[in-house]
């Protein structure tokens, strides 16, 4: 039986409404959980809320309500967001749950009984936002070294956990387990932090200062430090929210997903607490980066906080999920922009996957009486073998490698998936089913091509299901693939899809989004000036005397073309050299779209070509036409054809 997998997010603080950072971590955890369920692993996926501490107490006071009411008002926002993002968590913990509080007190009492908690007077610099003390050497110019907010000098008597005793054992453990903290850069940061002597940790707050917390079991005048309370959730949830024998089944955790700002808390505080409790440490703590917005740090004062509810309402949950995990390597910082999101939707989702599904369903309805046809073995050749190899390798090798919990290469997993999407579109273009359909003697070959195209989408549906579950279900429904998206689906084999099922065309999976840009007469400003010698005008509308007649327009020959090859032009960041099939001929076109598109993403695209443009030399290469694209100063997107249209067809 596959090993149990326990995945956690941090529990999110309820001093404010959820934002993109909360969504990012939780979507990543959801992808992992769904992927491991598909592979037959028992999975426990935990998320929830951290509801105690001074910040919550202050936020409640500011709102004029008691802390519990404050938490009860905000908790539904997080629960609703997880529904909106189609998060498949197994449990949602709140630190105000009575059972959680009892388990926290049990842990505190155990450490106290072992002599690992003591009381002492302490003077130091206190950060209210982080709810922690800092030493003199940590504070720079009166600011918290973590959040850069002002600190205040406090002297008070508190209880301390003897964290210093576990300094060397923790350092030894990190060196002996290179995948314990990931990525490697974050592990190096923690090792650097541990080069200084580890101090004991204050794990209480006097009720005279902070009353909203879990009372210490051995002193009713104090409440528990919020981080000690919060970290224990990873254990307590297994005791009362997981299936029976939860802790015995799922501990140690497979992976804790955290933001890089709370890595030290998890890698040092949590690890030493577990050591003190004689419990195994989690297998991996993976710290991801932060999101900025168009190069700026998110803040309410700047008005640039990304609302995940608004993103889903405008673009859909699956597109938002795809963008966050495709745009940057997990572990790195990322920059969010609406323009980049739209670009991904149009190029990857609409032109790539959406186009492949739409073409497939349309061709089956048009050429196979609306039912998946049966393949003919004698008509199966090298192209079909390439599809089978790529799709099988994707599911059996590439995804398991990229989604290994010590790697978490979500962006590479999606790159691998879209490699098969591109191969599927190329397969259609190379086999040209619309040509086969014209010859009754090629019906067997046509049926074979259509069947293998559907098989490609069956494998792709399984591959994208963890990332875009709604889309996977939609493809499954349109093509009657019979997938359950459960662990039974991990045994799929190429060629096992029964023919004869009727297909049903649905709404476009990812409708292209208008960027409100004009379509210039060439693919870029660079290419335009090379063709005409005139600067590009960005005027929104021409004057009346520059309007053209229908006869003028008819002089421009626009044709459908299929991109067969694409490569970068040496020494140019913008230019790509394209080989485009126009049906009766093949043209070389030099297009200034290299900043927007990687060459490999263009192969198989159906584009619109200006076919009667006088050839021009660009970087020493002849361009025999141009592709149409939208954009002013920079290209925003290619003009493409969604339905299957033969190369060379006139556009009018």
Image (cartoon, helix red, strand yellow):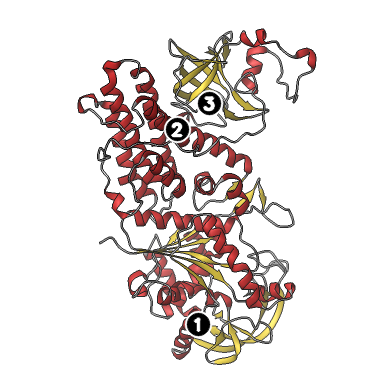
Asked if the residue under mark 1 is in contact with the one under mark 3, i.e. CB atoms within 8 Å, the reply is no
Task: Classify 10 Å Cα crowding around label 2: few (below 14), some (14-19), many (20 and above).
Answer: many
Q: Name the image quarter holding the N terminus.
A: bottom left
Identify the image quadrant of residue 454: top left
Residue receiving disc 3: 640
Residue receiving disc 1: 162
Disc assigned to residue 369: none
Counting from the top left corner in percent of width and height, residue 12 is at 56, 66
Counting from the top left corner in percent of width and height, residue 270 is at 48, 73
Left or right relative to 381: residue 162: right
- Single out the mark in the foreground, 2 or 1: 2
Disc assigned to residue 358: 2
The residue drawn where x is 52% and y is 68% is 48
Q: In this view, does 554 lie above or below 576?
A: above
Asked if the residue under mark 1 is in contact with the one under mark 2, i.e. CB atoms within 8 Å, the reply is no
Counting from the top left corner in percent of width and height, residue 24 is at 54, 55
Left or right relative to 577: residue 382: left
The answer to which of 387 and 566 lies nearer the viewer is: 387
Observer able to see residue 193: no
Secondary structure, mark 3, is: loop
- Single out the mark in the foreground, 3 or 2: 2
Tell me the distance, in whole angstroms, between the alpha carbons under discs 3 and 2. 13 Å
Secondary structure, mark 1, is: loop
Q: Name the image quarter holding the C terminus.
A: top right
Left or right relative to 37: residue 414: right
Q: Is residue 89 above or below residue 426?
A: below
Tell me the distance, in whole angstroms, between the alpha carbons under discs 2 and 1. 63 Å
Looking at the image, is mark 3 or mark 2 earlier in the sequence?
A: 2
């Amino acid at each position: 039986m596959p090993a149990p997998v326990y995945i956690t997010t941090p529990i999110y603080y309820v001093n404010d409404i959820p934002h993109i950072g909360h969504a990012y971590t939780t979507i990543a955890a959801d992808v992992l959980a769904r992927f491991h369920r598909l592979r037959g692993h028992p999975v426990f996926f935990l998320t929830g809320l951290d509801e105690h501490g001074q910040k919550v107490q202050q936020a409640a006071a500011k709102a004029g309500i008691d802390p519990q009411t404050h938490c009860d008002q905000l908790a539904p926002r997080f629960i609703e967001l997880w529904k909106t993002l189609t998060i498949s968590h197994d449990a949602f913990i709140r630190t105000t749950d009575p059972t959680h509080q009892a388990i926290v007190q049990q842990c505190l009492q155990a450490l106290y009984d072992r002599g690992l908690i003591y009381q002492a007077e302490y003077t130091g610099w206190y950060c209210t936002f982080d709810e922690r003390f800092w030493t003199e050497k940590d504070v720079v110019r009166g600011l918290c070294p973590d959040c850069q907010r002002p600190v205040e000098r406090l002297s008070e008597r508190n209880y301390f956990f003897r964290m210093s005793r576990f300094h060397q054992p923790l350092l030894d453990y990190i060196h002996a387990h290179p995948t314990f903290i990931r990525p490697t850069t974050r592990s190096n940061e923690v090792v650097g932090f541990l080069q200084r002597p580890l101090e004991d940790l204050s794990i209480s707050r006097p009720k005279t200062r902070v009353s909203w917390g879990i009372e210490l079991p051995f002193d009713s005048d104090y409440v528990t430090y919020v981080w000690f309370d919060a970290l224990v959730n990873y254990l307590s949830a297994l005791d009362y929210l997981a299936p029976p024998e939860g802790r015995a089944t799922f501990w140690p955790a497979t992976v804790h997903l955290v933001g890089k700002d709370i890595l030290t808390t998890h890698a040092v505080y949590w690890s030493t607490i577990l050591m003190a409790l004689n419990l195994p440490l989690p297998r991996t703590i993976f710290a991801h980066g932060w999101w900025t917005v168009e190069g700026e740090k998110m803040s309410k004062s700047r008005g640039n906080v990304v609302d995940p509810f608004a993103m889903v309402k405008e673009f859909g949950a699956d597109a938002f999920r795809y963008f966050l995990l495709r745009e940057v390597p997990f572990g790195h910082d990322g920059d969010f922009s609406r323009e980049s999101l739209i670009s991904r939707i149009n190029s990857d989702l609409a032109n790539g996957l959406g186009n492949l599904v739409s073409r497939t369903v349309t061709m089956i309805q048009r050429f196979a009486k609306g039912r998946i046809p049966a393949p003919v073995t004698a008509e199966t050749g090298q192209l079909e073998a390439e599809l089978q190899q790529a799709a099988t390798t994707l599911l059996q090798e590439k995804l398991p490698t990229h989604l290994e919990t010590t790697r978490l290469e979500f962006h590479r997993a999606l790159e691998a998936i879209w490699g098969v999407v591109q191969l599927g579109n190329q397969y259609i273009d190379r086999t040209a089913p619309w040509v086969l359909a014209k010859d009754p003697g090629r019906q067997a070959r046509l049926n074979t091509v259509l069947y293998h195209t559907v098989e490609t989408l069956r494998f792709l549906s399984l591959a994208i299901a963890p990332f875009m579950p709604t889309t996977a279900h939609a493809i499954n429904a349109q093509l009657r693939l019979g997938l359950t998206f459960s662990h039974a689906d991990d045994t799929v084999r190429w060629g096992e899809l029964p023919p004869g099922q009727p297909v049903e065309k649905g709404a476009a999976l990812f409708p292209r989004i208008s960027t409100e840009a004009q379509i210039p007469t060439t693919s870029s400003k660079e290419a335009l000036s090379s063709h005409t010698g005139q600067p590009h005008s960005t005027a929104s509308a021409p004057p009346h005397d520059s309007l053209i007649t229908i006869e003028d327009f008819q002089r421009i020959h626009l044709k459908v073309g299929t991109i067969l090859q694409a490569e970068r032009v040496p020494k140019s960041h913008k230019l790509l050299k394209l080989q485009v099939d126009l049906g009766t001929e093949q043209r070389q076109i030099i297009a200034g779209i290299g900043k927007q598109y990687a060459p490999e993403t263009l192969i198989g695209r159906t584009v619109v070509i200006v076919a009667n443009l006088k050839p021009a030399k660009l970087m020493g290469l002849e361009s025999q036409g141009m592709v149409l694209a939208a954009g002013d100063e920079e290209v925003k997107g290619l003009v493409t054809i969604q339905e299957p249209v033969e190369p060379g067809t006139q556009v009018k």
